[in-house]
Image (cartoon, grey):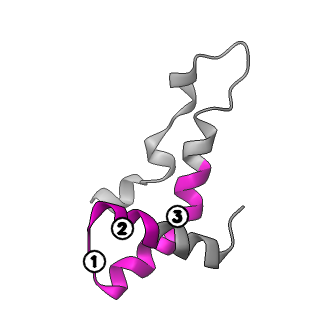
Amino acid sequence: MTTPEQSKAYVEAALAAAQITPSPEEVDVLVADYPKLRQIADGLYEFGDDLEPAMTYDPLEFFPLSAAN
């Protein structure tokens, strides 16, 4: 798991590479969400022999239905 300092460094590096300059509040949200997003991305590569990789990804795990309403 990443520390808050590592999350901030990763997010800032990605934003710099993409040449995106969000507001400080948006950066704070990205930094706060980074560990969960990283966990989900890593989970794409963790599956058993009896599962298809595509079956392990659930976008609603990160984006709950209540947030879309």
Which corner quadrant of the image does residue 19 belong to?
bottom left
Earlier in the chain: of badge 2 and badge 3, it is 2
Mark 1 touches mark 2? (CB < 8 Å): yes
The C terminus lies in quadrant: bottom left
Looking at this rendering, what residue extends furthest in the top direction?
50
Residue at 48 percent across and 53 percent down: it is: 62
Task: Say above or below: 25 vs 10.
Answer: below
Mark 2 belongs to which amino acid? Answer: Leu
Q: Is residue 32 above or below residue 36?
A: below
The type of residue carrying mark 3 is Tyr
Magenta highlight: main SS: helix
User: Residue shown at 54%/73% (left/top)?
Assistant: 9
Label 1 vs label 3, nearer the camera = 1
Q: Residues within 10 Å of mark 2 (few under 14, many from 20)?
A: some
User: Residue 17: percent from the left, percent from the top?
Assistant: 35, 62
Q: Viewer-nearest of labels 1 and 2?
A: 2
> Which picture quadrant has residue 47?
top right
Q: What segment is highlighted magenta in the picture?
A: 12-39
The spot of residue 55 in percent (x, y) is 54, 24
Tag 3 residue: 34
Q: Is residue 63 left or right of residue 41?
A: left
Disc 1 crowd, CA 10 A, few/some/many (<14, 14-19, 20+) = few
The residue singled out by tag 2 in the image is: 15
State yes or no: residue 50 in magenta: no
